[in-house]
Amino acid sequence: MTRVLYDLCGIDEGLRFSPYCWRVRYALAHKGLEVETRPWRFNDKAALAFADHDKVPVLVDGDAVITDSYEILRYLDRTYPEAPLLGDGVAEGRASFLKHYTERALQPAMLRTIVMDLLNAIHPDDRDYFRETREQRMGRTLEEFHSPAKGLAQLDAALEPLRGRLKESDYIDGEAPAAGDYLVFGSFMWARCVSSADLVSNADPVYRWLERMLDQHNGLGRGAMRITDVEGSYR
């Protein structure tokens, strides 16, 4: 049986930058499950028609087709209960909070910081789609939204609860990473893959956590292609 994950790619098929796909890639590695990652681009909606969905991640596991990163984590725990990601109801409640915290507090601040780098990392054929959909969502142009100084200040404030936790423990979920860590870390991988911006000071406990996360699962994150590895990406 071949397990397949449809995974967003950019100007190079090896440049995989979706925060939601990174959550799933780390979750699969946590479970020790092999997967074939299949590159997908924003305008390739037809490739996901079988899933009745138009976004990634999409995981195909035998006859099962699962969409949405959080639902994939839940599916993995139900189907492969060893090495749980979410654990009991209390742990799942904490993970759900971290999902919303990441998507509503961290990602908007990161996006304001890196949005023009992100546009540059997207395949040229997808840039008009990205610009149109994001500008409609934000009610302004990407250039108007882009403000690294404001974005970094917003991110610094949003990270304060995370700093408190990481002063107490090496990982958000305790002595070892699990769903909570992957839900948050996926967004940092998004920024890392598309931008060289320094989002966190190296004196910050969040930075030390990021370094530990990059080394998890045989350096899964540290070995990922970045925009700086793509020849001609800044032309």
Image (cartoon, rainbow, N blue to C red):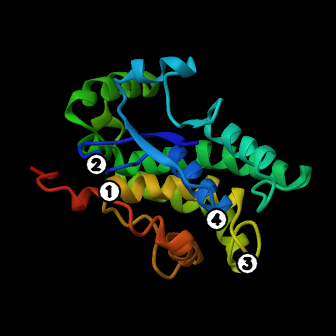
Q: Which residue appears farthest toward the front when viewing the image?
A: 1
| Residues tagged 2 and 3 counted as in contact (Cβ below 8 A) | no
x, y percentage for residue 153? 47, 58
Position of residue 18 in the picture relative to residue 43 (left or right): right
First in sequence: mark 4 or mark 2? 2
Residue 160 is labelled as 4
In this rendering, would 205 be left or right of 224? right
Given the image, on which type of amino acid does mark 3 rest?
Ser
Q: Secondary structure at mark 1?
A: loop
- Give the crowd class for mark 4: few <14, some 14-19, many >=20 residues within 10 Å: few
Left or right, 229 with respect to 199, comes to left
Q: Quadrant of the N terminus?
A: top right
Could you say whether the residue bearing mark 2 is in a helix, strand or loop? helix
Q: Which residue is mark 1?
A: 195
Do callouts 1 and 4 mark residues in contact (Cβ within 8 Å)?
Answer: no
Q: Mark 4–mark 3 contact, CB under 8 Å?
A: no
| Residue 210 visible in the displayed image | no
Q: Earlier in the sequence, mark 1 or mark 4?
A: 4
Tag 4: amino acid:
Glu
State which tag comes first along the sequence, 4 or 3: 4
Element at label 4: helix
Check the image and name the residue furthest to the bottom. 203
What residue is rendered at 28% in x and 29% in y?
126
Residue type at mark 1 is: Ser
Q: CA distance from mark 2 to mark 3?
A: 32 Å
The CA distance from mark 4 to mark 2 is: 25 Å
Above or below, comparing residue 45 to residue 124 in the picture: above
How far apart are the two marked residues, 4 and 3, measured between alpha carbons? 15 Å
